[in-house]
Amino acid sequence: MNILIIEDEYSLADAVAETLKSENFNVCIKTNGEDGEDEALTENYDLILLDVMLPGKNGFDILKYLRQEKIKTPVIMLTAKSEIDDKLNGLEHGADDYITKPFAMRELMARIKAVLKRTNNIEDTNCLEYGDLVLDLKNAKLKCKDNEIQISGKELELLEQLLLNKNQILSKESLIERIWGYESDAEYNSVEVYITFIRRKLKLIESKVNIKAVRGIGYKLEEKNDK
Ligand code: CA
C-alpha cells in the first residue's frame, strides 16, 4: 500500500511517515503543493494525506483539481484547529475524511484504515492469522491448511476481535461492546453461544487453535500443543 503525504511541516510529515512504515506502508513525502499535486496525478497511491496550508498550492485547490481530473484516490485532509471551515470545505471538494492537528498517531492510523477499508483498497491485506489459522475477512472464510469453512455475521466479528487482540484476554463485556455496541442489551450468554459455534468450526477444520475461557475474566486464543 502506497501513501502520499503532502505536508510542509517536516517534523510532522516524518513522524507520520515513520508510523506508516512501521505498519508496512510505502510512503512518499512532498513538502510543497505543486510537487504534491504532480505526484498525486501519477495515481500511484492508495491514499493521500493532504495538508491545507501549503507553499505553492493549497490543499483545497489540489483536491479540487484532482477530482476534476477524475483522480479518485482517497484523501484525508490534515487541517489546523483554527481553520474551522476546513472540514466542510474539504468534504465539499471530495475529501474522504479529515483530521484536526494536533492529532494522535493512533487516531490518524484508525482514520487511514477506515478510509482504506471503505474504499476497498485494503482487500489484499484482509486476512488475520494465528497459529495454523487464517481468517479471510473478505471471503468470510476460516481456513486451516487445506480445510476451510464459511464464517459470517457475529461469529466472524467475534473471531476477528480475538485475532486482533490475540495477546490479551477479552472480557465478555468488552466483546459485547465491540460487536453489539454500547447501547446493546445483548447478554453474556449470546457471547457464549457464538464462542461455542466458533469452537465447533475450529474443530471441523482441524485447527490447533482454541478459544480459551479464562474463568471470571473472558476469552483468549491459544494454540494447543501436540507435545
Ligand atoms: Ca502547512
Image (cartoon, helix red, strand yellow):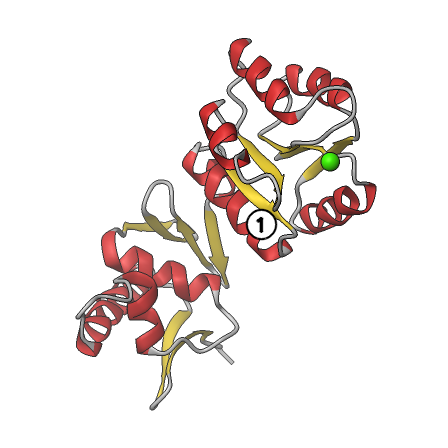
Q: Residue at x 68, y 24 (%)?
A: 58
Task: Determine whether, in the image, residue 200 is placed left or right of residue 166.
Answer: left
Residue highlighted by disc 1: 109
* Residue 122 makes an appearance in the image: no
Q: Residue furthest top?
A: 69
Asked if 81 appears above or below 212 in the picture, the reply is above
- Residue 171 found in image quarter: bottom left
Asked if 24 appears above or below 47 in the picture, the reply is below
Task: Determine whether, in the image, residue 171 is placed left or right of residue 52.
Answer: left
Q: Residue furthest bottom?
A: 216
Q: Residue at x 65, y 15 (%)?
A: 41
The one of 121 and 211 positioned closer to us in this rendering:
121
**Residue 110: percent from the left, percent from the top?**
52, 51
Asked if 104 appears above or below 70 in the picture, the reply is below
Q: Amino acid at mark 1?
A: Met
The one of 196 and 203 positioned closer to us in this rendering:
196
**Residue 44: percent from the left, percent from the top?**
64, 22
- Residue 224 found in image quarter: bottom left
